[in-house]
Amino acid sequence: MSLFVVTIDGPAASGKSTVARRVARQIGATFLDTGAMYRAVTWAAMQDGVDWNDQEQLAGVVERHAFAFEAADDAMLVCVDGIDITEKIRDPELTANVRYIASSGPLRAKLVEMQQALARRFGRVVTEGRDQGTVAFPDADAKFYLVADATERARRRKIDLEAQGVAADLDELRRTIEARDRSDEGRAVGPLRPAADSICVDTTRLTVEDVVQCLLGHINAGQNANSKMQK
Ligand code: DC
């Protein structure tokens, strides 16, 4: 089966998940939330009580547990050892620990393999993360890089949290987001950066619908150009 892959990378809270979910629905593709995969491994590592600075213990987490990622409507269901942890992986303490998993070379290699296997299984995917266009799918059919000003990203996160009944301080959220940007951009393996052939979209002043339409326009234009070349 031929693969059709759209990658959406970018910093924390730049709107990737919301946009990726909607674009996937529009083009009949499966949405891959690769951040959820890093979060699942972090959850398992926390259950094991690993020493975050012990690289061997960290690398062993994927050997000790069974990870399952399933497409469910617009979401990705995440199970570890048969336990559904889809909700649990959004916890702030866990979010702060993901950086240890995300900076481990062996774990990243394993997760990239799992992402490629999921793409082969589903055939048509919209995958979002930090390294999807650069490392996991360098030959993707369309690559996007979403950015937004940190204050705007904090404002969006605050609205999301408040919708869940969680009060949050805007400055504190912005500081946390900026710290994650530094950690994502600064790691030696799979750092956050745009692929040279990606289309960069600044979402600061755009609505979700604007961004979705912009991406769909590029995806359709790419497909039309491709079908003309094949004629
Ligand atoms: O998108 P998110 O906030 O759920 O991602 C959580 C963390 O996982 C993020 O801070 C960095 C890491 N991550 C990564 O290193 N590579 C990816 N492809 C996706 C996420």
Image (spheres, rainbow, N blue to C red):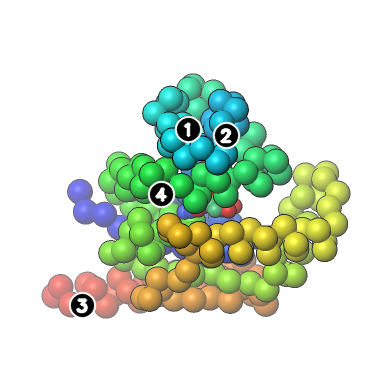
Label 4 or label 3, whichever comes before in sequence order: 4
Q: Residue at x 38, y 53 (%)?
A: 125
Query: Which numbered mark, 3 or 2, is in the foreground of this view?
Result: 2
Towards the viewer: 138 or 102: 102
Tell me the mark number nearer the camera, choosing from 4 and 2. Answer: 2
Camera-near label (4 vs 3) is: 4
Identify the mark nearer the N-term, 3 or 1.
1
Mark 3–mark 1 Cα distance, whole angstroms, equals 51 Å
- Residue 74, image x, y percentages: 52, 46
N-term-proximal mark, 1 vs 2 = 2
Label 4 vs label 2: CA separation? 16 Å
Of helix, strand and loop, which one carries label 1? helix
Label 2: which secondary element: loop
Does label 4 or label 2 sit earlier along the sequence?
Answer: 2
Residue that badge 1 annotates? 57
The amino acid beneath tag 1 is: Gln
Which residue is identified by label 2? 51
| Disc on the earlier residue, 3 or 2 | 2
> In this rendering, is residue 221 above or below 88?
below
Residue marked by disc 3? 228
Which residue matches tag 4? 105
Amino acid bearing label 3: Lys
